[in-house]
Image (tube, grey):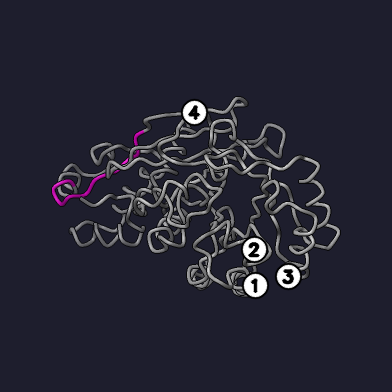
């Protein structure tokens, strides 16, 4: 079986032509797929019955995700779903909404998508990392997470505005499927989301960052740093190499040179671990003058023993970076109370 959500528009075009149909039939499939949300091929009535039958007989299908559990934050701005995919795997994905920038405008609706079930990176402060690695998701399973929320938002008269590849898994460890999904979601004959509205987050896999820089895409890149030196980073990220900090900084610098897109370094702040003024000074020295942005993320409650720093410590850490000329912000977390925030996703904890 081949899911139609797997096909790039050019591949859809080749499919219908090879089946003996005119080129425009491809758009008669693509338009409903991304804007009408059909559940099976017979839900596309503009296609000739014969073509629908031939597609079905040839093993083509529409693999929509099925919602099996939903949790909504107290303020209603964050929705976490457990989705059953067409391969019967289950994955968590999150919708985060922010107030509109214009009076009467639509809210900014960001979907946090997953690229794997579980994760092999083993970050000691991350719930997904602690559940271990199960499997990579196919491009169609990544796309279907977005489609599911797009349909939900359409019912409210809203739409998807941003995507962050910050859900379960390490995107660069599933590079080919991840990038296929990105190309489908940004194609003007696919889902049509602007490239600059997508951010890919990685623990710092240099080979993946290098490949992404060569894709000629205007995608945002966020690299999880979490420590200003290799000794501390190795404790937090057991899979990190002996020179991972230097490698990450160099990869970020090269990505900026190739794409012109400023790199964000994510820094999960943990009480008594990496939040001291001395460590802030070390981080400031490391990043001074490289034009990047630091996203300070006070750690969220997970199964581990790590604690969120006090607001005073968070603000002092930010102050030291800003004083040293390092651009930074403290992330406004959403969905913490429903385990939907950064580092909290795992399929066996859904409440």
The residue lying furthest to the top in this view is 74
> Is disc 1 in contact with disc 3, using a CB cutoff of under 8 Å?
yes
Indicate which disc residue 253 carries.
1
Which numbered disc flags the more N-terminal residue, 1 or 2?
1
Which numbered disc flags the more N-terminal residue, 1 or 3?
1
Disc 1 versus disc 3: distance between alpha carbons? 7 Å
Above or below, 37 against 125 in this view is above
In the image, the segment drawn in magenta is: 56-66
Q: Secondary structure at mark 2?
A: loop
Q: Position of residue 229 (x, y in %)?
A: 66, 66
- The answer, for residue 27, to whether it is visible in the render is no
Residue linked to disc 4 = 71
Q: Position of residue 316 (x, y in %)?
A: 82, 49
Left or right: where does residue 331 sit relative to residue 311? left
Disc 4 versus disc 1: distance between alpha carbons? 39 Å
The crowd level at tag 3 (other Cα within 10 Å; few <14, some 14-19, many 20+) is: some
Residue linked to disc 3 = 290
Disc 2 versus disc 3: distance between alpha carbons? 10 Å
Residue linked to disc 2 = 263
Disc 4 versus disc 2: distance between alpha carbons? 32 Å
Q: Position of residue 265 (x, y in %)?
A: 65, 59
Q: Position of residue 11 (x, y in %)?
A: 31, 61
Which numbered disc flags the more N-terminal residue, 2 or 3?
2
The crowd level at tag 2 (other Cα within 10 Å; few <14, some 14-19, many 20+) is: many
The crowd level at tag 4 (other Cα within 10 Å; few <14, some 14-19, many 20+) is: some
């Amino acid at each position: 079986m081949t899911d139609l959500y797997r096909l790039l528009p050019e591949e859809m075009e080749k499919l219908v032509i090879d089946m003996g149909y005119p080129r425009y039939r491809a758009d008669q499939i693509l338009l409903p797929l991304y804007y009408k949300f059909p559940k099976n091929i017979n839900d596309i009535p503009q296609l000739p019955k014969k073509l629908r039958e031939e597609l079905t007989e040839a093993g083509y299908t529409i693999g929509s995700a099925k919602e099996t559990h939903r949790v909504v934050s107290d303020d209603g701005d964050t929705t976490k779903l457990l989705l059953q995919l067409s391969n019967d795997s289950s994955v968590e994905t999150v919708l985060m909404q922010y107030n509109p920038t214009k009076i009467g405008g639509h809210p900014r609706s960001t979907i946090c998508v997953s690229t794997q079930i579980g994760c092999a990176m083993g970050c000691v402060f991350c719930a997904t990392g602690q559940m271990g690695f199960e499997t990579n998701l196919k491009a169609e399973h990544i796309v279907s997470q977005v489609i599911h929320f797009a349909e939900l938002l359409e019912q409210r008269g809203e739409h998807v505005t941003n995507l962050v590849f910050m859900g379960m898994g390490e995107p660069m460890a599933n590079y080919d499927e991840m990038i296929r999904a990105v190309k489908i979601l940004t194609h003007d004959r696919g889902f049509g989301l602007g490239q600059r509205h997508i951010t890919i987050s990685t623990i710092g896999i240099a080979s993946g960052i290098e490949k992404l820089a060569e894709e000629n895409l205007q995608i945002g890149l966020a690299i999880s740093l979490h420590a200003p030196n290799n000794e501390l980073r190795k404790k937090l990220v057991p899979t990190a190499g002996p020179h991972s900090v230097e490698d990450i900084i160099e990869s970020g610098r090269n990505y900026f040179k190739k794409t012109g897109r400023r790199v964000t370094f994510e820094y999960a702040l943990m009480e008594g671990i990496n939040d001291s003024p001395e460590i802030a000074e070390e981080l400031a020295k490391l990043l001074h003058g490289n034009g990047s942005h630091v996203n300070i993320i006070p750690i969220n409650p997970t199964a581990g023993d790590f604690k969120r720093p006090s607001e005073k410590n968070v603000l002092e850490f930010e102050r030291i970076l800003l004083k040293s000329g390092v651009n930074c912000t403290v992330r406004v977390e959403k969905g913490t109370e429903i385990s939907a925030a950064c580092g909290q996703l795992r399929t066996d904890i859904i409440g």
